Amino acid sequence: MPQDLLYERLADRMRRQIQRGVLRVGERLPSLRRLGRDQRISLATAVEAYQQLEREGLIEARPRSGYYVRAAAGAAPRSSRARHLSRAPMPVRNPALLGVLDVQSRRDLIPMHAATPDASMLPSAALAAAVARAMRRDPHTALSYTVPQGLPQLRERIAQRYAQCGVEIDPDEVIVTAGAMEAISLTLRTITRPGDIVILESPTYHGLLQAVSAHGLRVLEIPNHPGRGIDPAQLRELLERHSVRAALLVPNFNNPLGSLTSEASKREIVAACAVHGTVVIEDDLYGELAYSGERPSPLRRFDDGEHVVTCGSYSKMLAPGLRVGWMIGGRRRSELLRTKSFSTVATATLPQMALIEFFARHDMERGLRRLRRTLAGNAQVYRQAVLDHWPDGTCVAEPAGGMTLWVELPPAVDGQALFEAALARGIGILPGHLFSNRGDYTHHVRLSCGQPWDRKIESALQTVGELAKHLQG
């Protein structure tokens, strides 16, 4: 039989299996060698079949992992594509932000509202052993204050990690913090004064809005576009119209969209802010969680230490509860360190020592590969479940990394009403208006896909879909 017919027949058979659900969304397909062996075909034929299915958008290749069944294509949220720039800066006035912490602290909900990975996806046992070793090795140091800047070995580790993605950082620039949120808050406190103007993306993480509100700052919103992130031209327009003190941006896998700003756009963003004297505060919390496996550059790569302060954390990679993050301040290092010293004196010593112990015995990259694969698979199956079970007209953004899904509901379904109905059924989601200072996105919700896919999650998504259909009338 001619080889072209062989690969076409194989692709057609697999296409039908995907359409019937025999091959499920997120499922890993046989390797090329195994497919060739099982089907008694050449490796070239197996490659042609997979490439054909990939061109059709039915499967995807993940670096160093293999081929997986993709979710069905779905339109990106409509209103997220058509956001407009802020006309004037305004204080943070979204009253819904005050109540979000009450929901975040609940432990009785199916947690699709919390953007953290489940403990089963993280090296919890290895970290627990590292904590125990740190206590045994030097209990006096572990229970004492350390220097405000953080332990040197940990700062070196953070600098080395950035060097792997092309960013040369002196470990002396690194200041260890209690998570990324403390790093962002300390940076805002250092470089801004009440009444200053700060640019934020829209939609953006509600915690960033809360941090800006706590410092009495005014907000300009710039659209973050599904699939392409921040538009440098729109940023330049805002910078030319207003005197902007800082731009608080999430270029790598924005929460909630999961979008990735291109390398070229990042370079333009840093250059534009430099021209206008605007400090970029980069939230790089999700930078290591690329579904492709390729770590995108932080904005700091395109800066010489003058204009960008990069903030990050181990919370999404290793353990949220350790609360170990950092800020890389360039020439602002001394100012930031002084603010840190006057704020919390120093970050807790024991978690830092535990991480040093962990890194001495374990390769973080191995665990990250597993975490990325799991989150990428979760995003696909969660997304497919929404497309299958929620009302017609529901649109879901397709994230490139991170652990959140941004869902636009049909116009008749209010996100706050769906949030409340789901809450009454013990299911946690978040309404879209939390992610905008102006209270936009009233017909959106955000889901976290940080929980392993199982029958409970599947049932919860079906239930929320039924509630949405009921609200639609």
Image (spheres, rainbow, N blue to C red):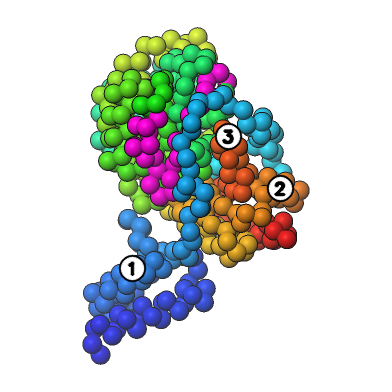
Q: Secondary structure at mark 2?
A: helix
Residue 151 location in percent, x, y? 40, 20
Give the mark nearer the N terminus: 1 vs 3.
1
- Write down the residue under mark 3: 438
Contact (Cβ within 8 Å) of mark 1 with mark 3: no
What's drawn in magenta, residue-wise? 214-238
Residue 463, placed above or below residue 16: above
* Residue 138 relative to residue 97: left or right: left
Q: Residue furthest bottom?
A: 1
Q: Horizontal placement of 436 versus 297: left or right?
A: right
Residue identified by numbered label 1 = 55
Q: Position of residue 306 (x, y in %)?
A: 29, 20
Amino acid carrying label 3: it is: Arg
Q: Nearer the viewer, residue 108 or 211?
A: 211
Which three-letter amino acid code belongs to the residue tagged 1?
Arg
Q: Nearer the viewer, mark 1 or mark 3?
A: 3
Which residue has dot 2 on it? 417
Q: Amino acid at mark 2?
A: Ala
